[in-house]
Image (cartoon, rainbow, N blue to C red):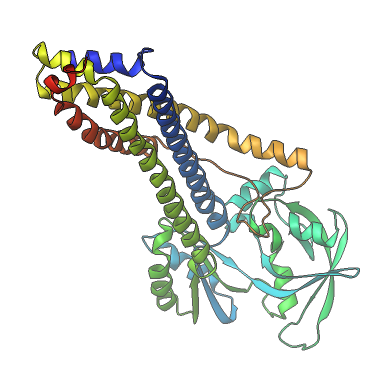
């Protein structure tokens, strides 16, 4: 009790030397900055991780199974795929590689079929198209473009555009006039490559005899990290020659986000360690400043353990104060940073995060209580470790040697 009282009194006393008070404030400020930065960084990386899972990987099918020949019996294959315990949804799809041409502007892309009735309920594309009022393609040769594709070509809804592709029977590109019935914005890299049309239009473009035939089956899984296993299993189960999963196109991006997260957390952890061990110099100066007080306390009967406790409590008080303020500032920064970035974009008149470079065009944050708890405990633990050396030094002070010169 005595150690705690005196330790807290030393922590917030105004009767310290100017040097000790200054270094103590610097140590506290360093801890505040380190904790708040680590909370901010982890929140941003968590946000990117969540956005990658919920948006980009939600748009891209988790497993894609493709055939060399048109699939007319796709209903049977879809029902068979749905029986797999890891498959949450399955849908038929067609794709056709070609180019969109508008004047002197050209944009290569894979034109993909889209049928609202065949999409999983949690499909991000389906949700965004419903918000636009889209219920399905009503005529042939209609197309929905990603925002970046439409911007590149300079087209608007209601205008016509030329699509050039080569079907199975004609080697030369055949231009097809298509009407733009919608422009969709997902806020991800998919906006640069998205082109949707109905299944029948794609069947005609590819020269299929059966206009209901498709190129393959797409699977959406309960656990996206089992995609490779499911792809191999379903390839043989459905008898289709080709299978791929989301890791082939987005795996490197996901791994890069995870690696960046670990490296940044490690760097900021080092900052916390430096801030924590600044307490060593602060407490050593405090011990020298309070040496006479320690000597008097020893002569009054204080044990070495009580002296040790005084300076441990003093260091812990500085650490707790730094961590608490760091948590407050870190959470406030995490909440305010996306708005600050948006405000900066408006002031500068340019987009800071572009989907040509980054996976999404906004800065996401995701504050998690468990991360704050781990950061706080880690910082407090380092602070306690840092107090041991100065506290032991104080406990070993000789009262007779100190008071001889008083």
* Quarter of the image where the N terminus is located: top left
Residue 165, quarter of the rendered image: bottom right
* Residue found at the far front of this picture: 405
Task: Work out whether 376 lies above or below 143.
Answer: above
Left or right for 219, reference 139: left
**Most foreground residue, 363 or 185:** 363
Residue 385, quarter of the rendered image: top left
Report the number of discs. 0
Query: Is residue 1 at least partly visible in the picture?
Result: no
Q: Which residue does the image show at 47% across and 46% down from the upper left?
A: 46
Left or right for 375, reference 312: right
- Give the x, y percent position of residue 355: 67, 56
Residue 91, quarter of the rendered image: bottom right
Query: Is residue 375 at least partly visible in the picture?
Result: yes
Left or right for 88, reference 250: left
**Most foreground residue, 26 or 333:** 26
- Give the x, y percent position of residue 361: 65, 50
Q: Which residue does the image show at 34% across and 25% down from the upper left?
A: 318
* Quarter of the image where the C terminus is located: top left
Task: Work out whether 228 lies above or below 386.
Answer: below
Task: Work out whether 299 lies above or below 371.
Answer: above
**Most foreground residue, 406 or 270:** 406
Task: Work out whether 321 lies above or below 173.
Answer: above
* Residue found at the far top of this picture: 300
- Give the x, y percent position of residue 134: 72, 49
Q: Which residue does the image show at 77% across and 87% down from the upper left?
A: 170
Left or right for 300, reference 153: left
- Give the x, y percent position of residue 229: 38, 69
**Most foreground residue, 329 or 164:** 329
């Amino acid at each position: 009790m005595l150690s705690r009282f005196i330790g807290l009194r030393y922590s917030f006393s105004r009767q310290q030397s100017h040097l000790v008070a200054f270094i103590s404030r610097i140590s506290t400020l360093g801890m505040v900055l380190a904790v708040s930065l680590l909370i901010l960084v982890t929140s941003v990386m968590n946000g990117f991780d969540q956005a990658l899972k919920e948006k980009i990987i939600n748009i891209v099918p988790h497993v894609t199974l493709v055939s060399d020949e048109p699939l007319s019996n796709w209903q049977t294959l879809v029902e068979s795929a749905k029986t797999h315990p890891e498959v949450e949804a399955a849908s038929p799809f067609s794709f056709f590689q070609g180019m969109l041409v508008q004047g002197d502007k050209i944009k290569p892309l894979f034109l993909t079929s889209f049928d609202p009735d065949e999409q999983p309920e949690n499909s991000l594309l389906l949700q965004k198209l419903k918000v636009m009022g889209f219920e399905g393609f009503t005529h042939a040769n209609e197309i929905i473009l990603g925002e970046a594709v439409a911007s590149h070509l300079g087209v608007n809804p209601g205008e016509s555009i030329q699509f050039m592709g080569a079907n199975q029977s004609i080697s030369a590109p055949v231009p097809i006039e298509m009407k733009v019935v919608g422009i969709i914005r997902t806020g991800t890299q998919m906006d640069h490559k998205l082109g949707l049309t109905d299944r029948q239009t794609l069947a005609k473009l590819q020269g299929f005899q059966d206009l209901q035939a498709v190129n393959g089956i797409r699977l959406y899984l309960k656990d996206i990290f089992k995609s490779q296993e499911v792809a191999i299993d379903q390839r043989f189960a459905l008898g289709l020659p080709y299978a791929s999963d989301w890791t082939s196109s987005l795996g490197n991006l996901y791994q890069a986000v995870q690696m960046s997260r670990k490296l940044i957390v490690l760097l900021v952890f080092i900052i916390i360690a430096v801030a924590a061990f600044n307490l060593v110099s602060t407490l050593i100066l405090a011990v020298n400043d309070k040496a006479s007080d320690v000597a008097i306390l020893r002569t009054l009967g204080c044990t070495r353990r009580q002296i040790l406790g005084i300076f441990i409590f003093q260091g812990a008080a500085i650490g707790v104060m730094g961590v608490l303020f760091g948590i407050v500032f870190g959470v406030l920064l995490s909440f305010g940073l996306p708005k600050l970035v948006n405000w900066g974009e408006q002031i500068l008149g340019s987009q800071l995060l572009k989907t040509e470079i980054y996976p999404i065009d906004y800065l996401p944050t995701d504050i998690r209580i468990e991360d704050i708890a781990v950061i706080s405990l880690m910082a407090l633990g380092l602070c306690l470790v840092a107090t041991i050396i100065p506290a032991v030094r104080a406990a070993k002070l000789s009262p007779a040697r100190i008071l001889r010169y008083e």
